[in-house]
Image: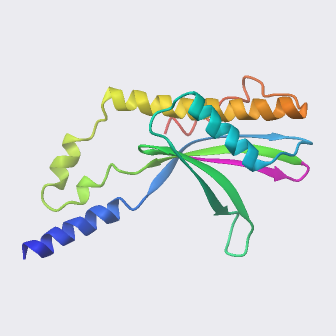
Amino acid sequence: MWTIILILVAVIILAALSGKSEVSGNWSHLFANMQANPENFYTLVEQSLQERQVPDFKTARKIFSEGGIMSHNRLYLEVSRGDYIFHICAAPWGNAFFFSWWLRKKSNESIFEKLPVIGKFIAEANQYDTYYKLDTDGMFRASVQQAVLSAVDSLTETKGVKGLTELERKPDLRSFLK
């Protein structure tokens, strides 16, 4: 009997940890009359993060569909640490080239609520992150944004393209305020 209960609890926890996330920020910019190699851009971003000695980050190349099953695919650079995942894109758009990132936060807040009987109490006791976690999460988000902008600056300078203005460098804050 206890084995079945333990298996059930494990299944509930694994289902809750299945990678659900929600968008919590984004940034993008289109450069007219510019072409670049996405892979070179992704390497510049990774090098910038390594130079900044950002702790505990991971990177991977990910392929995402542009739309449905028969649509083209896009190569993204995934940069993750803890609860946060950046999906960074560099791609042609007509005779232009764009850069973007989407920040996703893993949805862990309801994991404990799904546990039978004691879940609600555990969730309430763990509802607030520590200031240290909030600070390090913020530093990770800022580090990735700075690494992306550094890589964009490097490519635009190499290509002789006008760089980003201060306003163009800022992410969409509306999504951060939700």
Q: Is residue 146 visible?
A: yes
Residue 101, horizontal then vertical, whole percent: 64, 44
Residue at image position (14%, 75%) is 4
Nearer to the camera, 40 or 69: 40
Residue 72, horizontal then vertical, whole percent: 75, 67
Q: Which image quarter is the N terminus in?
A: bottom left
Residue 67, horizontal then vertical, whole percent: 69, 66
Residue at image position (50%, 35%) is 177
Q: Give the colouring mode of the picture.
A: rainbow
Quadrant housing residue 163 = top right
In the rendered view, tell whether residue 63 sits above or below residue 165. below
In the rendered view, tell whether residue 12 sits above or below residue 154. below
Residue at image position (49%, 41%) is 57
The total number of labels drawn is 0
Q: Mostly what secondary structure, the magenta segment?
A: strand
Left or right: residue 163 compared with residue 11: right
In the rendered view, tell whether residue 122 sits above or below residue 132. below
Left or right: residue 16 compared with residue 34: left
Start and end of the magenta stretch?
Answer: 86-95
Nearer to the camera, 90 or 15: 90
Q: Is residue 171 visible?
A: no
Left or right: residue 121 compared with residue 18: left
- Assess whether residue 103 is covered by the magenta stretch: no
Residue at image position (12%, 59%) is 117
Residue 60, horizontal then vertical, whole percent: 57, 52
- Assess whether residue 92 is covered by the magenta stretch: yes
Given the current orientation, which residue lies at the most extreme left position? 1
Given the current orientation, which residue lies at the most extreme top position? 166
